Image (cartoon, rainbow, N blue to C red):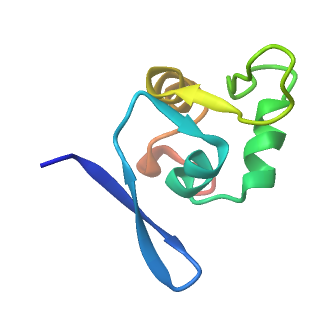
Amino acid sequence: MTEQTHYKHSTKRLPVPVKEYYSAHEVACLLQISKDKVYDLARLPGDPLPLRVLRGHARGSLIHRDDLREWMERNSVLFAERIGR
């Protein structure tokens, strides 16, 4: 059986399968943020979300799952350690 994560889109749950590369839309669903926010994170000056595109193409952003995991570890905190607790 293939491992997968589910996300909400409108009123139905759609699967996001575990795979090597995720689209910007899949990243948005996994992180429960908008696709626009994904692109905002990719434009950050300090430690941008490492989205990749093929040379000469403006569409089709992808991120490798290891890059996403590593970026998340650098740019998030444990729930118990969050500010304002």
Residue 55, placed above or below residue 15? above
Front residue of 63 and 49: 63
What residue appears at the point 53 percent right and 37 percent down from the top-left corner?
22
Q: Is residue 79 above or below residue 22?
A: below
- Can you give x and y, in whole percent of width and height, for residue 60 in the image? 72, 35
Give above or below for 72 relative to 33: above
Q: Position of residue 16 (x, y in %)?
A: 41, 53
Specify whether 21 is left or right of 6: right
Residue lying farthest left? Answer: 1
Total tally of numbered discs in the picture: 0
Query: In the image, is 16 to the left or to the right of 8?
Result: left
Residue at figure coordinates x 63%, y 51% from the top left: 25
In the displayed orientation, state which residue is furthest to the bottom.
11
Lateral position of residue 26 relative to residue 80, left or right:
right
Q: Nearer the viewer, residue 68 or 15?
A: 15
User: What is the x, y in percent for residue 19?
Assistant: 37, 35
Residue situated in front as seen by the camera: 39 or 47: 39
Residue 56 falls in image quadrant: top right
Please give the name of the residue rendered at 44% of the width and 21% of the height, measured from the top-left corner.
66
In the displayed orientation, state which residue is furthest to the top: 55
Quadrant of the rendered image containing residue 14: bottom left
Quarter of the figure with the C terminus: bottom right
At x 55%, y 57%, the residue is 29
- List x then y, in percent, for residue 3: 22, 46
